[in-house]
Image (tube, helix red, strand yellow):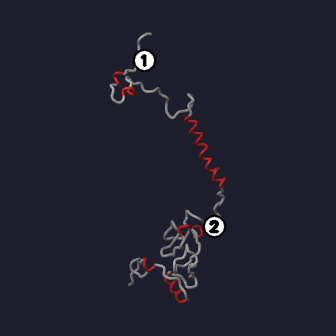
Amino acid sequence: MSMRGPLTFDGWYPRDHKPSAPPTNEEERRAAAVKYGLRPEDYHSMDKDDVIKFAGDYPDLGVVTYDHKDPYEAWTDRQNRRNWGELVPIDMMRYRGDRLTFTGLEAEDYTTWGSIVMCLRVLVPMALIAWYFCNDHPNALRWRNPAMPKQYPYDFYRAYPFDDPRKYPIVNYSFDLE
Protein backbone atom coordinates (compact mmCIF):
# COMPACT_ATOMS: atom_id res chain seq x y z
CA MET A 1 0.00 0.00 0.00
CA SER A 2 1.47 3.32 -0.99
CA MET A 3 1.11 6.26 1.34
CA ARG A 4 -0.29 9.53 0.05
CA GLY A 5 -0.08 13.01 1.50
CA PRO A 6 2.07 16.09 1.47
CA LEU A 7 4.92 14.61 3.51
CA THR A 8 5.19 11.22 1.87
CA PHE A 9 6.03 11.90 -1.75
CA ASP A 10 9.06 13.47 -3.38
CA GLY A 11 8.82 17.03 -4.50
CA TRP A 12 6.89 18.41 -1.53
CA TYR A 13 9.72 20.40 -0.03
CA PRO A 14 10.31 24.00 -1.20
CA ARG A 15 13.90 23.21 -2.15
CA ASP A 16 12.52 20.82 -4.79
CA HIS A 17 10.48 23.65 -6.33
CA LYS A 18 13.26 26.20 -6.48
CA PRO A 19 13.52 27.43 -10.08
CA SER A 20 16.70 26.37 -11.84
CA ALA A 21 18.33 27.80 -14.93
CA PRO A 22 16.04 28.27 -17.92
CA PRO A 23 15.98 25.35 -20.36
CA THR A 24 18.26 25.63 -23.35
CA ASN A 25 17.34 22.49 -25.30
CA GLU A 26 14.30 20.25 -25.81
CA GLU A 27 15.36 17.70 -23.19
CA GLU A 28 15.71 20.34 -20.47
CA ARG A 29 12.38 21.83 -21.50
CA ARG A 30 10.67 18.45 -21.14
CA ALA A 31 12.32 17.96 -17.73
CA ALA A 32 11.11 21.39 -16.58
CA ALA A 33 7.58 20.61 -17.80
CA VAL A 34 7.56 17.36 -15.80
CA LYS A 35 8.97 19.18 -12.77
CA TYR A 36 6.04 21.61 -12.76
CA GLY A 37 3.41 19.02 -13.67
CA LEU A 38 2.69 20.34 -17.17
CA ARG A 39 2.53 18.64 -20.52
CA PRO A 40 5.64 19.41 -22.60
CA GLU A 41 3.55 21.16 -25.26
CA ASP A 42 1.96 23.40 -22.59
CA TYR A 43 5.25 24.46 -21.04
CA HIS A 44 6.62 27.89 -21.99
CA SER A 45 9.41 29.44 -19.96
CA MET A 46 9.49 33.10 -18.99
CA ASP A 47 11.20 35.59 -21.25
CA LYS A 48 14.79 36.16 -20.11
CA ASP A 49 14.57 39.85 -20.96
CA ASP A 50 11.59 40.44 -18.65
CA VAL A 51 13.45 41.51 -15.51
CA ILE A 52 10.27 41.66 -13.42
CA LYS A 53 8.75 38.22 -14.12
CA PHE A 54 11.79 36.12 -15.04
CA ALA A 55 12.30 33.28 -12.55
CA GLY A 56 14.54 30.65 -14.11
CA ASP A 57 12.63 27.70 -15.53
CA TYR A 58 9.29 28.64 -13.91
CA PRO A 59 6.57 28.38 -16.57
CA ASP A 60 4.74 31.33 -18.04
CA LEU A 61 1.12 30.48 -17.28
CA GLY A 62 -0.37 33.60 -18.84
CA VAL A 63 -2.96 35.84 -17.26
CA VAL A 64 -5.86 33.95 -15.75
CA THR A 65 -7.78 36.19 -13.38
CA TYR A 66 -10.17 35.29 -10.59
CA ASP A 67 -13.16 36.25 -12.74
CA HIS A 68 -12.06 34.03 -15.62
CA LYS A 69 -12.40 30.94 -13.43
CA ASP A 70 -15.69 29.10 -12.98
CA PRO A 71 -17.45 30.21 -9.77
CA TYR A 72 -19.43 26.95 -9.59
CA GLU A 73 -16.50 24.56 -9.66
CA ALA A 74 -15.67 22.73 -6.43
CA TRP A 75 -12.40 24.53 -5.68
CA THR A 76 -10.09 23.32 -2.95
CA ASP A 77 -9.39 26.94 -2.06
CA ARG A 78 -12.68 28.67 -2.76
CA GLN A 79 -11.51 32.11 -1.74
CA ASN A 80 -8.82 32.22 -4.44
CA ARG A 81 -10.51 29.74 -6.85
CA ARG A 82 -7.52 27.38 -6.84
CA ASN A 83 -7.11 23.65 -6.51
CA TRP A 84 -4.49 21.91 -4.43
CA GLY A 85 -1.28 21.46 -6.36
CA GLU A 86 -2.28 23.93 -9.07
CA LEU A 87 0.55 26.11 -10.32
CA VAL A 88 0.48 29.72 -9.23
CA PRO A 89 1.16 32.37 -11.88
CA ILE A 90 4.13 34.57 -11.08
CA ASP A 91 1.86 37.62 -10.81
CA MET A 92 -1.04 35.96 -9.00
CA MET A 93 -1.25 38.70 -6.37
CA ARG A 94 -2.25 41.17 -9.09
CA TYR A 95 -5.25 39.16 -10.22
CA ARG A 96 -6.88 38.02 -6.98
CA GLY A 97 -10.62 38.34 -6.48
CA ASP A 98 -10.28 41.80 -4.96
CA ARG A 99 -7.88 43.12 -7.59
CA LEU A 100 -7.69 43.68 -11.35
CA THR A 101 -9.78 41.79 -13.87
CA PHE A 102 -9.91 41.78 -17.63
CA THR A 103 -13.39 40.45 -18.22
CA GLY A 104 -14.78 43.78 -19.40
CA LEU A 105 -17.59 43.60 -16.86
CA GLU A 106 -16.11 46.10 -14.43
CA ALA A 107 -16.59 49.81 -14.84
CA GLU A 108 -13.40 51.65 -15.67
CA ASP A 109 -14.74 55.17 -15.40
CA TYR A 110 -12.40 56.53 -12.76
CA THR A 111 -11.42 60.00 -13.88
CA THR A 112 -9.87 62.89 -12.01
CA TRP A 113 -13.07 64.93 -12.04
CA GLY A 114 -15.13 61.93 -11.06
CA SER A 115 -12.98 61.32 -8.00
CA ILE A 116 -13.11 65.03 -7.08
CA VAL A 117 -16.90 64.97 -7.31
CA MET A 118 -17.00 61.81 -5.19
CA CYS A 119 -14.88 63.49 -2.49
CA LEU A 120 -17.04 66.61 -2.56
CA ARG A 121 -20.20 64.52 -2.22
CA VAL A 122 -18.84 63.36 1.12
CA LEU A 123 -16.96 66.42 2.39
CA VAL A 124 -19.51 69.16 1.62
CA PRO A 125 -22.36 67.57 3.62
CA MET A 126 -19.94 66.87 6.47
CA ALA A 127 -18.86 70.53 6.50
CA LEU A 128 -22.47 71.76 6.42
CA ILE A 129 -23.48 69.49 9.28
CA ALA A 130 -20.43 70.57 11.31
CA TRP A 131 -21.22 74.25 10.68
CA TYR A 132 -24.87 73.75 11.61
CA PHE A 133 -24.04 72.11 14.93
CA CYS A 134 -21.09 74.36 15.82
CA ASN A 135 -22.30 77.87 14.98
CA ASP A 136 -22.74 80.44 17.78
CA HIS A 137 -26.35 81.44 17.15
CA PRO A 138 -28.36 81.18 20.41
CA ASN A 139 -31.19 79.23 18.75
CA ALA A 140 -28.88 76.78 16.97
CA LEU A 141 -29.23 73.08 17.57
CA ARG A 142 -26.67 71.94 20.12
CA TRP A 143 -25.12 68.61 20.98
CA ARG A 144 -25.85 69.31 24.65
CA ASN A 145 -27.97 71.80 26.56
CA PRO A 146 -26.41 75.20 27.16
CA ALA A 147 -25.36 75.91 30.73
CA MET A 148 -23.94 78.84 32.64
CA PRO A 149 -20.33 78.61 33.74
CA LYS A 150 -19.78 76.83 37.04
CA GLN A 151 -19.77 79.22 40.00
CA TYR A 152 -16.90 78.90 42.47
CA PRO A 153 -16.77 80.55 45.89
CA TYR A 154 -13.14 81.64 45.54
CA ASP A 155 -10.93 83.00 42.76
CA PHE A 156 -8.53 80.11 42.33
CA TYR A 157 -6.83 81.69 39.31
CA ARG A 158 -5.68 84.77 41.28
CA ALA A 159 -4.46 82.61 44.15
CA TYR A 160 -2.52 80.18 41.98
CA PRO A 161 0.12 78.86 42.69
CA PHE A 162 1.19 79.88 46.21
CA ASP A 163 -1.57 82.01 47.68
CA ASP A 164 -4.60 80.98 49.69
CA PRO A 165 -7.76 81.20 47.54
CA ARG A 166 -9.85 82.14 50.61
CA LYS A 167 -8.24 85.57 50.41
CA TYR A 168 -10.07 86.17 47.14
CA PRO A 169 -13.77 85.41 47.64
CA ILE A 170 -16.16 85.76 44.74
CA VAL A 171 -19.67 87.03 45.35
CA ASN A 172 -21.74 85.33 42.71
CA TYR A 173 -25.00 86.56 44.21
CA SER A 174 -26.18 88.26 47.36
CA PHE A 175 -29.41 88.52 49.27
CA ASP A 176 -28.59 92.04 50.42
CA LEU A 177 -30.76 94.80 48.99
CA GLU A 178 -28.86 97.49 47.28
Give residue 112's position: percent from left, percent from top.
65, 55
Per the model, the C-alpha gap separating discs 1 and 2 is 78 Å
Give residue 86's position: percent from left, percent from top.
51, 75
Give residue 77's position: percent from left, percent from top.
49, 69
Label annotation for residue 173 = 1
Label annotation for residue 103 = 2
Give residue 137's quadrant in the image.
top right
Question: Eyeballing the image, is 108 above or below 53?
Answer: above
In which quadrant of the rendered image does the C terminus lie?
top left
Q: Secondary structure at mark 2?
A: loop
Q: Mark 2 is on which residue type?
A: Thr
In which quadrant of the rendered image does the N terminus lie?
bottom left
Q: Residues within 10 Å of mark 2 (few under 14, many from 20)?
A: few
Q: 98 or 150, which is in the foreground?
A: 150
Horizontally, residue 108 falls left or right of residue 86, namely right
Q: Mark 1 is on which residue type?
A: Tyr
Q: Nearer the viewer, mark 1 or mark 2?
A: 1
